[in-house]
Amino acid sequence: MKGSAFITGATSGFGLAIAKRLRSEGYKIIALGRRKDRLEKLANELGQTQIAVCDIRDKQAVFDVVKNLPKDFKDIEILINNAGLALGIEGIIDASLDDFETMIDTNVKGVVYATKAILPIMKERKSGYIINIGSVAGVWPYPGGNVYGATKAFVHQFGLNLRNDLKGLDIRVTNIAPGIAKTEFSEVRFKGDTAKADAVYEGTKYVSAQDIATIVSNCVNLPKSVNINTIEVMATTQSWAGFYFERD
């Protein structure tokens, strides 16, 4: 019998799609997010779903969620560190320091909080799978990526270091780094400006949330003797812009 999958940022985008996919494969779902109405809708749709209305930036709340899980959901096999966001596209001189702090608290501290809260369960079970949702922005810079890209670089390196720390425990760790993907991500980045958000995807193709859920499923269903360290995935229409040169 399969255990539980703990998914942060489960109310939309990648997290929502991953929750639906893993539930269809027999996992119980622990869905964490801030929007109670969406979590309740998801639980009603999927069944065997425990909701956790929580802001991933709230350290005590995250640990309390894990501590107070019903017994039937404490058998956590999978942690999906998905909660994350980008805010703005301005250069670092003009960008908001408050936005920087929100991204750091969510994308960096949130991953650390959820991982630290859940690892004791996996250690006791001597089994588990941690999947961190990063971004190509953590590897490849672009104008306006500044702090967002830096937070995703942290996610990547944190996952690699986890692999070293967890040796001997049969706990797998994978970093999945998507490129352009159409979810609510851009709406959040542009603070509800749907015109700007839609322009990001205009005239091109992109990765879907379901594509990322499929990749997660493929990783989870590999033999337990196999660990995928990193997957970098971009739409076929996306590639690197090349180097920029200033000219006189």
Image: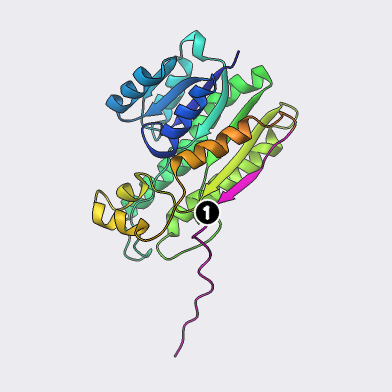
Instruction: Indicate the position of residue 211 as horizontal and vertical percent values.
Output: 50, 42
Dominant SS of magenta comes to loop
Instruction: Please determine whether, in this image, residue 226 is positioned above or below residue 86.
Output: above
**Residue 227 is one of the magenta-drawn residues:** yes
Instruction: Indicate the position of residue 117 as horizontal and vertical percent values.
Output: 52, 25
Q: Secondary structure at mark 1?
A: loop
What span is in magenta? 226-248
Left or right of 81 in this view: 102: left
Instruction: Indicate the position of residue 232 as horizontal and vertical percent values.
Output: 58, 50
Instruction: Please determine whether, in this image, residue 170 is positioned above or below residue 208.
Output: above
Work out whether residue 64 or residue 217 is closer to the camera in this orientation and state it. 217
Res 94 quadrant in image: bottom left
Instruction: Please determine whether, in this image, residue 243 is positioned above or below residue 84.
Output: below
Left or right of 130 in this view: 84: left
| Identity, as a three-letter code, of the amino acid under mark 1 | Met
Work out whether residue 142 or residue 151 is closer to the camera in this orientation and state it. 142
Furthest residue toward bottom: 248
Location of the C terminus by quadrant is bottom left
Work out whether residue 219 or residue 150 is closer to the camera in this orientation and state it. 219
Residue at image point 38% right, 63% down: 92
